[in-house]
Amino acid sequence: MVRVRYIVDDVDAAVDFYTGQLDFTEVMRPGPGFALVAREGLQLALSGTGGPGGGSQPMPDGRVPEPGGWNRIMLEVSDVAAEVERLRGAGVTLRSEIVEGRGVRQILVEDPAGNPVELFEPLSRES
């Protein structure tokens, strides 16, 4: 099992996005500032920007955790074009159009806090 933490500004909206749009299941939500969702071998820890949890605490230099950036989780899909149309219909923000890379077609979508999620479709099973 791999666990990744995403900082979000609205835990409820993030849970709704990941469970409603990307086939995650809610594992736990012990309080308003934290939830854990899972898909296959990935657990995604969704931490709010405020509160007592360790994921929201400021660093010694004063920087505070915030959503966004470019690091991302990657989710394999069987038909990226169909997923893009479904997500567009649901009002999901897309950072790009579908691009073709080395052996994959891919696109970046954003969760409600602006964290990127890469959806990719291998061009062949050997990719």
Image (spheres, rainbow, N blue to C red):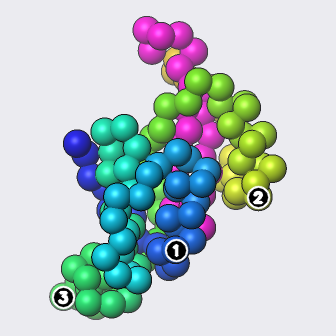
Amino acid at pointer 3: Pro
Residue 82 can be seen in this image: yes
Quadrant in the picture for the C terminus: top left
In the rendered image, the vertical position of residue 32 relative to residue 115, given as above or below:
below
Can you tell which of label 2 and label 3 is closer to the viewer? 2
Residues at marks 1 and 3, CA–CA distance in whole angstroms: 29 Å
Q: What stretch is highlighted in magenta?
A: 105-127
First in sequence: mark 1 vs mark 3: 1
In the rendered image, the vertical position of residue 68 relative to residue 55, given as above or below:
above
Can you tell which of label 1 and label 3 is closer to the viewer? 1
First in sequence: mark 2 vs mark 3: 3
Left or right placement of residue 86 versus residue 51 in this view? right
Across and down, in percent, residue 68 comes to 50, 67
Across and down, in percent, residue 105 comes to 61, 27
Query: Residue at the location (52% across, 50% down)?
Result: 117
Location of mark 1 (residue) = 12
**Does 118 lie within the magenta span?**
yes
First in sequence: mark 1 vs mark 2: 1
Residue 49 can be seen in this image: no
Mark 1 near mark 2, Cβ–Cβ under 8 Å? Answer: no
Left or right placement of residue 103 versus residue 29 in this view? right
Which image quadrant is residue 26 in?
A: bottom left
Residues at marks 1 and 2, CA–CA distance in whole angstroms: 17 Å
Query: Residue at the location (50% across, 64% down)?
Result: 15
Residues at marks 2 and 3, CA–CA distance in whole angstroms: 38 Å
Location of mark 3 (residue) = 60
Location of mark 2 (residue) = 91
Can you tell which of label 1 and label 2 is closer to the viewer? 1
Amino acid at pointer 2: Gly
Element carrying mark 2: loop
Residue 127 image label: none
